[in-house]
Image: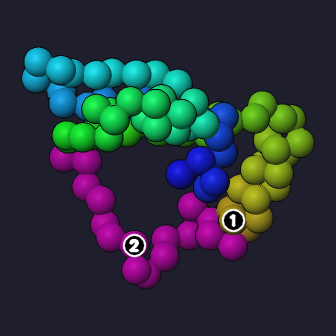
Amino acid sequence: MATIFGADRAVTFCRELTKTFETVHKSTLGELVEFVKADDNQQRGEIVVVVAGVGVAKDTDDISTHDKLLQRLLEDLSVKKKQPHWPLISLV
């Protein structure tokens, strides 16, 4: 996982939830590998790993790219022209 998502990706490691020896550990993927290696007990039982998503970069160029794409789509797929395969929608 660390190779694919990156060692700095945030994760939450949950083991043996709702049981006596429950563990919830928040760290990065890189740190999690060391945490699990250091304690054999963390390698046993039912485990859930929740991996954080990628953050969205706030870049104005990215917004203009989306605007250009939307404009191009509107030229080809005008919302004013009813396409024959679109279902009829009734607001009753």
Viewer-side residue, 66 vs 73: 66
Query: Residue at (40%, 22%) from the top-left corner?
Result: 25
State the image coordinates of residue 69 (x, y, percent, origin top left): 76, 59
Quarter of the rendering containing residue 57: top right
Residue identified by numbered label 2: 86
Q: Which mark is residue 73?
A: 1
The mark nearer the N terminus, 1 or 2, is: 1
Does 72 appear above or below 67?
Answer: below
Viewer-side residue, 81 vs 40: 40
- The amino acid sitting under disc 2 is Trp
Query: Residue at (63%, 54%) from the top-left corner?
Result: 3
Query: Residue at (40%, 72%) from the top-left corner?
Result: 86
Specify the segment rendered in magenta. Answer: 76-92
How far apart marks 1 and 2 lie (CA) works out to 16 Å
User: In the image, is 9 to the left or to the right of 75?
Assistant: left
Magenta-drawn stretch contains 83: yes
State the image coordinates of residue 21 (x, y, percent, origin top left): 18, 20
User: In the image, is 71 to the left or to the right of 48?
Assistant: right
Query: Residue at (52%, 38%) from the top-left corner?
Result: 33
| Mark 1 surroundings within 10 Å by alpha-carbon count, few (fewer than 14), some (14 through 19), many (20 or more) | few
Does 23 appear above or below 53?
Answer: above
Q: Residue furthest right?
A: 61
Q: Secondary structure at mark 1?
A: helix
Marks 1, 2: nearer the viewer = 1
| Mark 2 surroundings within 10 Å by alpha-carbon count, few (fewer than 14), some (14 through 19), many (20 or more) | few
